[in-house]
Structure formats: C-alpha cells, structure tokens
Image: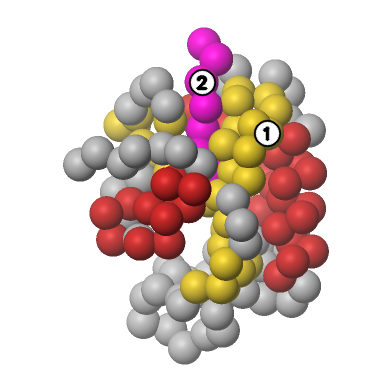
Amino acid sequence: MVDVAYIALGSNLGDRHGYLAAARQALASLPSSRILACTTIEETEPLGPTTQGTYLSQMVALETELAPLNLLSELHRIERDAGRERRERWGARTLDLDIVLFARQRVSQAGLTVPHPELPNRDFWQRELAELGVEVRA
C-alpha cells in the first residue's frame, strides 16, 4: 500500500546540517519511496534529563510502499550509518529518525506505535506537520 510517512529528523552532535542532509538523501534512496516535501530546519531544545546541546530538527513527507516495520528498520540502518549509538534514552545523537505519523494508517505493534506517542508533547513536531499542511487530530 502506498502511504505518506511523516519522518522527524534530528541531530545534536557533530555536523548537524550534514547529518540531516545525508538522512534526506538516504530517505530519498529507499526502495519504492520518494520525498514529497521537507520543512524548514529549526533549532530545538533537547528533551529528557541529560544535559546536551540543542538539536537541528526537520520533518519530511515520504511517500513509500514500505511496510511500517520495514520502514522503521531502514530508519535504524540510516541512523547507524550516521554513527548513531543507542546508549541512553533521550541522549545526544548524531541522527535521530522517528516515524511521527502516516497519512492513511495507524500502527500498534511491538516496537512501533504510530502516531508517535510523544506527538502531543512535541510542539516542534506539530509546527512541522502544520508546515507540511497536515492537521493533527487528538
């Protein structure tokens, strides 16, 4: 099934702009997928208990035929390729990719819930979705 996935991109370590650019390129290269639109990049405060630098954040609308868990697996691969190390929850990272929303489906499976459970708590995601023309409903 073809759907549009709204993917949040974030980086707060190293060449933040470079990591976001590499992520966009990798997303555009996924099989049966293409980027439809990207938001403006914005600087956002980190979430969670750890002291760390600010993030560069952006969202892309990705048209894809990949199943949700396959898409998530590809996002994790892209993060690893960017040097992401999963050491602590909400810790600093070279690249963070999250499936925030799908246009046509909801997902509730082990390891993946979409809409993302943190969507109501992240104003910047809501702003980015609005920039992409998506109305967020509770």
- Cα gap from disc 1 to disc 2, whole angstroms: 12 Å
At mark 1, the secondary structure is strand
Amino acid type, callout 1: Ile
Give the residue at x 67% y 67%: 94
Mark 1 in CB contact with mark 2 (< 8 angstroms): no
Of 132 and 33, the residue lying toward us: 132
| Image-based side of 34 in relation to 101, left or right | right
User: To which residue does mark 1 refer?
Assistant: 35
Q: Quadrant of residue 10?
A: bottom right
Query: In the rendered view, does 42 fall on the left or right side of 116?
Result: right
Instruction: Reply above or below: 23 against 46.
Output: above
Q: State the predominant SS element of the stretch in magenta.
A: strand
120 vs 54: above or below = above
Q: Where the C terminus falls, by quadrant?
A: top left
Three-letter amino acid code at the position of disc 2: Asp
Q: Nearer the viewer, residue 46 or 67?
A: 46
Indicate left or right for 128 with 112 as reference.
Answer: right
Is residue 3 in the magenta section?
A: yes
Protein image colouring: secondary structure
Which residue occupies 43% across, 84% down? 50
- Magenta span of residues: 1-7
User: Please, is residue 35 above or below residue 83 in the view?
Assistant: above
Kindly state the secondary structure of the residue where label 2 is placed: strand
Within the magenta stretch, is there residue 2? yes
Seen from the viewer's position, the closer of residues 48 and 18 is 18
The disc, 1 or 2, on the residue closer to the chain's N-terminal end is: 2
Question: Farthest bottom residue?
Answer: 51
Residue linked to disc 2: 3
